[in-house]
Amino acid sequence: MKKVFLFPFPKNENFDGYHIDSLDPSTYFSSDKHGTFRDMINGGMGKWNRMRNFGYAHEIDTLYRTKNKGYMHYIRDFLDKFKDFDIFVMSAYNPIHPEIIYRHLKDKIKVLGFIDDPYSSYRSGIPYLWAFDGAFYISTSYNEDTLFEDQMSKWGVSNNKWHPLAPKTIKHPNLDNEFFYNRSVDLVYIGNYYGHKMERLIKLKKHFGTKFQLHGRWPLKGYAGAVRGLFGKPFFYDRITGISEVDRQNLYFNTKIGLNMHMSPTPTETGNMRMYETPYHGMMQICDKAGVNAHEKIYTPDTEAIYYDNTDEAIDLIEYYLTHDEERVKIAKAGFERTIKDYNWENNLKELLDWASGLKKNKS
């Protein structure tokens, strides 16, 4: 059985022939209970926001070069615990300095994940590439005119693979017609606070009002959208709070249309987790388009999902499908079937690990 360091996944003694384990760096650093006011305004608070900063290449480099006590303790434990592992996959961000990887993991297979691109490419991906044997990417497009696989080639990464953010297997209700038809909520969007998305969400909420349910981990106890108005930006007056996993699943099962949008306001990246979760729960998806029409590689337009160019078009499409149930259900069913067929979490992870197992260790 091959041993895999799969960061930041929980331990699994036998995942389809692979022993998986990881090591959380956050436990090696003391931190205050709350983030700074700026942290809260910019999209988060607490440990998660700080750990995202820890994932930036320049932060890792600073910890490494200053021999930060907590970081060096983490590295020692990492090297000791995983010295006999075969494969190292950094699937969220890479917590290990590339010089450590180069010196101590020469005889191992190393794979780097590109998961938040293009925003994280130059802060959390490219600086590490020289120390890895291959890379996978989430978005099928890199920008408005380049597929991600082509961009990987430009960066000199010949061993690269698309890895869809497939949802984990859940138990569905009876999959009869009622599963798709009998839904009382018109429109839903669940996502954390990002300034890039606020004006789009404001316009949608203003138009649909109570028909549009919106949830997410928003800072300032859910009032970040209102506080941003103090800085001269458009107000979002509603309080937006998180939702439990159980309530989230029930809401998804009871919603007709799942709205999706990515960070970029114009067609760029595609393939966030919401893109797969929406049809997997039986909703019809209305999603923003990607660069180079790369969204078509994931779900077939007008058959498995509906795509829009801008917020005004999204509003028109939502209005249309809320009054055309047969067409909505037909697309929802097709999207659901495509997800079951091609985007199974366990199968996709197994495929990624099998691909990684076959990589040539080319860092010597």
Image (cartoon, helix red, strand yellow):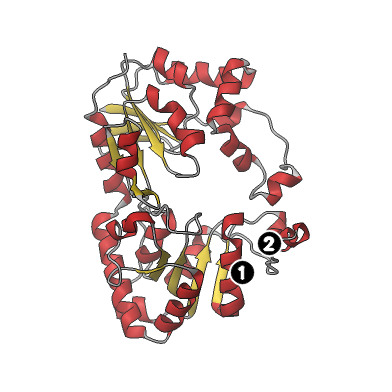
Q: Amino acid at mark 1?
A: Ile
Label 1 crowd (10 A; few <14 / some 14-19 / many >=20)? some
Q: Which residue in the structure is indicated by mark 2?
A: 225
- Which residue is drawn at the image coordinates 57% and 61% (left, top)? 243
- Which residue is drawn at the image coordinates 78% and 59% (left, top)? 230
Q: Nearer the viewer, residue 302 or 20?
A: 302
Q: Quadrant of residue 356?
A: top left
Label 2 crowd (10 A; few <14 / some 14-19 / many >=20)? many
55 on left or right of 253: right
Q: Quadrant of residue 329?
A: bottom left
- The residue positioned farthest toward the bottom in the image shown: 323
> Residue 193: where, in percent of width, then height?
60, 56
- Which residue is drawn at the image coordinates 56% and 22% (left, top)? 61
Instruction: Report the label total.
Output: 2
Vertical comparison of 187 with 200: above or below: below
The secondary structure type at the circle numbered 1 is helix
For the question of whether residue 33 can be seen, the reply is yes
Q: Which mark is residue 202?
A: 1
Q: Are marks 1 and 2 in contact (CB under 8 Å)?
A: yes
Q: CA distance from mark 1 to mark 2?
A: 9 Å
Vertical comparison of 348 with 170: above or below: above
> Residue 99: where, in percent of width, then height?
46, 17
The secondary structure type at the circle numbered 2 is helix
Vertical comparison of 209 with 199: above or below: below
> Residue 73: where, in percent of width, then height?
57, 18
